[in-house]
Structures are given as C-alpha cells and as structure tokens.
Amino acid sequence: MTDFPEIKVPRPDELDLEFFQAVAKAGALHIQRCNACGTWTHPARYYCPNCSSGDYSFAPASGRATVYSYTVSHMSVEPGWQARVPYVTIVAELWEGPRLVTTAKGIRPDEVAIGMPVRIVTETKSPDFAIFRAERAKGDAA
Ligand code: ZN
C-alpha cells in the first residue's frame, strides 16, 4: 500500500463507456474487435475502419505489447500525480495492432526503452472504469 493521494479518473461515455465497462467487468484487457472482419480497433469506433461494419464486440486481448513511445513526467499540477513523479507514460503497441496509452508499473524512467516488451495489466476502479498499466514482460516474446 502507498500513501499516495487518489488519482482523479475520467467519466467515460458512449463507446468509451462500453469499452471501460468490458475491461472493468472482466478485470482484464479487452479491445474492440469487428465481428465481420476481425480488425482490432482502439479507441473504440462505431464503424470498423477496415470494412465499415457496425457489428463489434469487446474481445479479450493478449496483453502482449511493446513500447512504441514514452515520456517521463517530472512535474504535474494534479495532486494525485504530483506524489508519483517522476513517472513514465507509455504508448504501447499491442500484439493485436492498436496502440494504448498507459502508465508504467515497476519500470523506472531509466529502464524504459522503445521496443521494450511489456504486458498490459488492468486495475478496476469502478464498474465503469479501469486503468491500464504496462509492466515488464516476464519472458514473453512480444
Ligand atoms: Zn471490419
């Protein structure tokens, strides 16, 4: 446990709400997948960017990813984040294709690198919201 202040979380709506509810309910990463052609999409969209179908579901994703990009924040105006600086924000490229913005869990700023294999884990905050964290992959081939 930490003594960090709670981080304020957004209130998703529309498709984002469907997405976050799927992740929160399952306690694991789910990503929108087209039921017609199988294309994975994130952020969620009403129509598939590949075939324009509106038939989709939120399917379990592998959680396997690599660091596509990252930044290290050394200051923040939000109290919940001020207590955590410096922290690493990662754009993770999922094995399924889409990219997802996460924060690092257990990866120090001097350890993170582009191309580094990571595993995406979720933390359910409410029935309508979960956050994503990128951990160091443990022996996984990304
Ligand atoms: Zn499609």
Image (cartoon, rainbow, N blue to C red):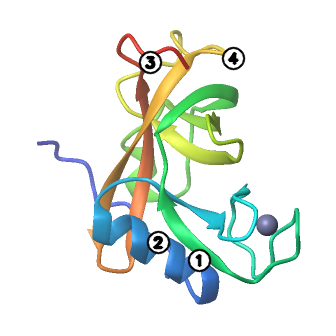
Question: In the drawing, does residue 21 fall left or right of residue 59?
Answer: left
Compute the Cα span from label 1 to label 3. Answer: 29 Å
Residue of label 1: 16
Of callouts 2 and 3, the N-terminal one: 2
Which residue type carries mark 4? Answer: Ile
Q: Is residue 103 left or right of residue 4?
A: right
Please tell me which of labels 4 and 2 falls first in the chain.
2
Residue corresponding to mark 4: 114
| Residue drawn at point x = 41 percent, y = 72 percent | 22
Label 2 amino acid? Phe
Q: Position of residue 127 (x, y in %)?
A: 30, 79
Q: Which residue is mark 3?
A: 108
Mark 1 to mark 2: distance in Å?
6 Å
Along the line of sight, which residue is nearer the eye, 37 or 84? Answer: 37
Of circles 2 and 3, which is in front?
2
The location of residue 117, given as percent across then percent down, is: 54, 18
Picture quadrant of residue 125: bottom left
Q: Residue 121: x, y in percent?
A: 37, 43
Disc 1 crowd rating (10 Å Cα; few below 14, some 14-19, many 20+) is some
Rendered image: mark on residue 20:
2
- Location of the N terminus by quadrant is top left
